[in-house]
Image (tube, coloured by chain):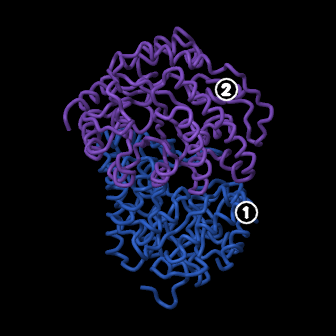
Chain colours: A blue, B purple
Amino acid sequence: MTIASDPPLLAVLKGEHRDPPPVWLMRQAGRYLPEYRALRAEKGGFLELVYDSDAACEVTLQPLRRFGMDGAILFSDILIVPHAMGQNLTFGVGEGPHLSPALSDGDFSHLTPEPGHLAKIYETVTKVRAALDPKVTMLGFAGSPWTIATYMVAGQGSKDQSEARRLAYRDPQAFQALIDRIVTVTVDYLSGQINAGAQAVQLFDSWAGSLSPAQFERWVIAPTADIVSRLMQLHGDVPIIGFPKGAGAKLAAYAAETGVDAVGLDETIDPVWADMMLPVGMPVQGNLDPLALIAGGDALKTAVTRIRAAFDSRPHIFNLGHGIVLDTPVDHVEELLDLLHKPL
Amino acid sequence: MTIASDPPLLAVLKGEHRDPPPVWLMRQAGRYLPEYRALRAEKGGFLELVYDSDAACEVTLQPLRRFGMDGAILFSDILIVPHAMGQNLTFGVGEGPHLSPALSDGDFSHLTPEPGHLAKIYETVTKVRAALDPKVTMLGFAGSPWTIATYMVAGQGSKDQSEARRLAYRDPQAFQALIDRIVTVTVDYLSGQINAGAQAVQLFDSWAGSLSPAQFERWVIAPTADIVSRLMQLHGDVPIIGFPKGAGAKLAAYAAETGVDAVGLDETIDPVWADMMLPVGMPVQGNLDPLALIAGGDALKTAVTRIRAAFDSRPHIFNLGHGIVLDTPVDHVEELLDLLHKPL
């Protein structure tokens, strides 16, 4: 139920339709912004920024000052959860993340979670929320168990999540135990963010696209439903956005079966199809191709119009279909916001 | 229209239902087979095998001798087409293919196709067909223009086909000209394979999954429809299988709009959904998760049963959802064929 003081993005997540749609962009705080690069150069590595709540707060606020987004997304990383669970986490220069030791044998008995590890993150949430204009919605997030497990098992990102998928076929019990443990930590983590001031949370399932339908049911839908139901008991009125990237046609089952309040759409999803297949009134978020944003001009305008038109009678939060790409021109983001502020 | 002498796989492609379903596996000839590795060690590189029609014929036949598949797929590579169009093609040891020079600027005026380049491939088709049991169907293939263009533009494979997608947004005219040229060569190439003895052909669109819906319409559906209509005029009775890997929910539009006779399904597609969404009677091919084949045992049996049950009233060719993986145990392929030869 929306209340009069809800900011636009939160109101849409609770089921209201707004025109123009509220907007934020995945990875809106990050390396494409010169002010981010400057702060990062000063502070050192990525993790130093994440665990320094003043710096993380500043980074979270940077895109809001520049563009006037409707949402602030906590500056952090989904791999903070396995880090808190006891894996070592490093980000090599020009490389992706590394978690060690990898759990490819399904044995995680040596992991010793440290209580209190996540407190710094909650501190960031509180600082950001205190600094926010009340018209802006504070968003927390976590990775979904399947995606987190793919990194924990392989120790790094991979092309097709083969190691986790193999383990899940080879030893479903061990894999289930790992997923269950991630579910528990994720509920605590999101609950902590909500207690610290997050007004809605997003579950990023970046690698949902590599699973066969039966595996998708078991490793994406079931654990997501578990997290949603536990969070609902703790924080009934805080909306949860599920973002199963690459789910394709399985998005409809995801939306119907997980209990999430809203779904994020990646850029490969046809918005006309999504509007037809998703439950009436369910809020959606997305789904501009990040490369159309890089192109700008007519390509951008055409893509934006198509998305807005498809969702003109559904609660819709405008966003990209995945994170903003490093070489996105800052003035194209301004161009996008100008386009969105005009009537369709 | 099927005729009495059509082998089972060809009959299914023409719309007949067979139980058990005929079967072949993508990359059924290849490195997981010891006899392939032995021949490759003797002959040198991958391209040496492809352009040696005796060796390519032998490799094509290897899995048939071992497993009794219903289809023989020409041993070749989709990048033979850009090679024939004038790009240099190399396969480094342990690396993917390289095409040079890359066409990232959209300029391909320097390409000078050599007529006759593809004759060796047609020779292989003729030799295989002559050696085949008449119960086995000879399949030709080519890459789809979008997928071929992604390699031609980037000069190599890539995680998200970013270079081709950027060029397509930045300079749609140049990209269209490249696509058109690939369409023309592909029609010639498939027609040549058919004249040499191919009884059906498959268009592999391995990277169809990275496109937004509007781009999918323009760069996947439209050029595929173009190829299909030109081939239909030349060879009206030769079935064409379209395999838009990663198309997700856009598979329904692909099946309805391209004119292909049958669609290949990758392993992320829910067969129950596909059976519901695809035109009644349209043959499908797929879609076992290659990692379920590696797992074997119960995981394999469950996955196979699920697929067969979904397609028990539709013309269905059993296959993987993508190519067989290098470390697949040969005896698991035997296990699969045993499962398929039992009633559901």
Quadrant housing the C terminus of chain B: top left
Residue B189's x, y, as percent?
60, 28
Q: Identify the image quadrant of residue B190.
A: top right
Query: SS at mark 2?
Result: helix
Q: How many marks?
A: 2
Locate residue A107 relative to residue B166 in the image: left or right. Answer: left
Q: Element at badge 1?
A: helix
Q: Residues within 10 Å of mark 1 (few under 14, many from 20)?
A: few
Tell me the tag on residue B67: none
**Outermost residue toward the top in this view:** B42
Name the residue located 49 percent from the left edge and 76 percent from the top edge: A314
* Residue B73 picture location, percent across and down: 45, 25
Residue A291, given in percent of the width and then of the height, sits at: 66, 55
Above or below B219: residue B101? above
* Mark identifier at residue B83: 2
Is residue B330 shown to the viewer in this render? yes
Instruction: Give the residue displayed 46% in from the left and 37% down from the top.
Output: B241
* Amino acid on which the number 2 mark rests in the picture: His
The subunit carrying tag 2 is: B
Identify the mark at residue A298; answer none if there is no mark: 1
Q: Nearer the viewer, residue B247 or A283?
A: B247
Query: Which residue is located at x 64 percent, y 74 percent?
Result: A69
